[in-house]
Image (spheres, grey):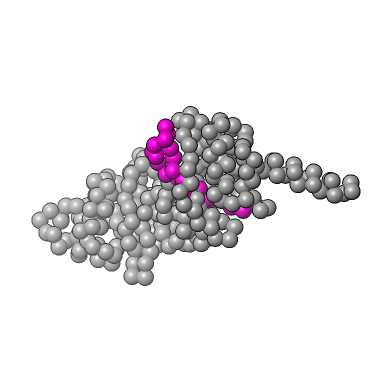
Amino acid sequence: MKQTLSVVTIFFVLLVTNCSSGDVATTSPEKLIKAFSSTVTSEDLAKAETFFTGDCWNARINPGERFVKQALKKKFELKATDSKTRGKKAVVIADILREGKVVDQVYFYAIEENSLWKIDGMDENRNHGEHYLNDRLPARFDLSGYPPSQQLQDLGTRLIGIARPLKEETKDDPEKPKTLLEGVLIGDPGSIYSGLRLLLEASKLNLRVVSTHMVDSIQRGAIVIKDPTGREKVFIYVAKEASGWKLINCTVGWLSEESILR
């Protein structure tokens, strides 16, 4: 009898420990987000931490603690609108509501641990989920941690080399982009020219490739180009296809996971 009571007691303690406010165990991704939302609404920071994996709570990219503190400060609620589960992974889409109005949307990347679900990452990128569910990308996608690529280095160098003539010689010759871009990037020359406008604007500076980041699992990469001062000027994102490299995006500011997943 003592052994039976002991097992029951242990089960009860575990159940209480892993339940949300409202005593709902996080036995599904949907229940996880519902319980988490209730805890955020009740402004219980300590309780909110229990819904995250330890790595996610203090992560460098999109940490759970920062998200919760922002939620408490702005007093918003979460409402799950859709979810998809594959094995022990799930993506839950939730609306962010303030005063009853939807103001944004967030994607939660959940993982099952010991029959309970926890949040292992989150962002606002609608293209991340399928990669996560198919084990191509982790829940917390940090592009800066991916290795360099000689192919991207060579591509970046070539793009810098043609940027100035591409800008200067296309004014009077609409066919010039096609000639200059041949063998460098695939796709419509006009679209590529427009997409590279930030590189073209900086083309009179002494630019150089300072780093590259290749994500082999999704066959996409990033090229970081700077001027002599070391200040970031241009970030180029490309996808590797059978016939060559295709331009995804060209931005300034910082290395962006959002941009490479467009």
Residue 177 lies in what quarter of the image?
Answer: bottom left
Relative horizontal placement of residue 12, taking residue 254 as reference (left or right): right
The kind of secondary structure the magenta stretch mainly shows is strand
The front one of 48 and 179 is 48
Q: Is residue 143 magenta?
A: no
Relative horizontal placement of residue 62, taking residue 262 as reference (left or right): right
Q: Position of residue 154 (x, y in %)?
A: 36, 60
Residue 150 lies in what quarter of the image?
Answer: bottom left
Q: Which quadrant of the rendered structure holds the C terminus?
A: bottom left
Q: Residue at x 47, y 43 (%)?
A: 79
Q: Is residue 106 magenta?
A: yes
Mark yes or no: residue 129 visible: yes
Q: Residue at x 56, y 40 (%)?
A: 36
The residue lying furthest to the top in this view is 73
The front one of 228 and 226 is 226
Q: Position of residue 38 (x, y in %)?
A: 55, 37
The residue lying furthest to the bottom in this view is 242
Q: Position of residue 208 (x, y in %)?
A: 34, 50
Q: Residue at x 79, y 47 (%)?
A: 8
Mark yes or no: residue 123 visible: no
Q: Position of residue 74 (x, y in %)?
A: 45, 30
Q: Residue at x 33, y 70 (%)?
A: 243
State the extent of the magenta-drawn residues as a range: 93-113
